Image (tube, rainbow, N blue to C red):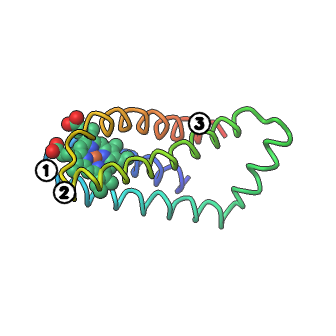
Amino acid sequence: MVFHAANVAIFLFILVGAALHHKRQLHVKMMLTAFVLDLALLFAVELADGAVAQAYRSVGEGKAIIMTHVAFAVSGLVMWIVQIHAGRKIYKQGRMELLPRHAKGARLFLFFRLGNVVTAFML
Ligand code: HEM
């Protein structure tokens, strides 16, 4: 239950951080904080439930909902890296031509992150 609450809280924090992108410095700080919190949640779930081993088992057993949840989680992690990479270039080097791609990436990331929250409640 505490993990569900943390997951929803981080998701809401991400939504606020994304909405505040015009306040650049705040946006960067909030998104990097959310990334650290997301990793911390992953480690906490792993320590408490052996989540990675469970995920491997469920893929072997073909459990659809866990596989879907893992797919959202892994895609979300990949999109974190993509967003941080492009975001840093926009922030540090003023590469404004990367902004449309960063915005598209944001939509895809938020879709995966929402999918993660929804499927977590179905496990
Ligand atoms: C998954 C995480 C992130 C999401 C969902 C996200 C989302 C967004 C969105 C929706 C925009 C507005 C795009 C537009 O106006 O067309 C934006 C702009 C921006 N983002 Fe991110 N972002 C993320 C991570 C980061 C990170 C980690 C950094 C820096 C290290 C960063 C730096 C920036 C900068 C500099 C802008 C331009 C701000 C402006 O002038 O409006 N973002 N981001």
Residue 17 higher or lower than 45, as above or below: above
Residue 104 higher or lower than 17, as above or below: above
Tell me the amino acid under the disc marked 3: Thr
Kindly identify the residue that appears in the image at 51 percent across and 47 percent down: 78
Foreground of the two, 100 or 69: 100
Kindly identify the residue that appears in the image at 47 percent across and 41 percent down: 113
Percent position of residue 58, x then y = 79, 43
Mark 3 residue crowding within 10 angstroms, few (<14) / some (14–19) / many (20+):
some
Where residue 16 sits, quadrant-wise, is: top left
Element type at marker 1? loop
Residue lying furthest right: 61
Q: Which image quarter is the C terminus in?
A: top right
Percent position of residue 48, x then y = 66, 64
Residue 43 higher or lower than 97, as above or below: below
Identify the residue position indicated by label 2 in the image. Answer: 26
Element type at marker 3? helix
Percent position of residue 79, x then y = 46, 44
Identify the residue position indicated by label 3 in the image. Answer: 119
Tell me the amino acid under the disc marked 1: Lys
Q: Earlier in the sequence, mark 3 or mark 1?
A: 1
Task: State if disc 2 and disc 1 touch (CB < 8 Å).
Answer: yes
The circle drawn on residue 23 is 1
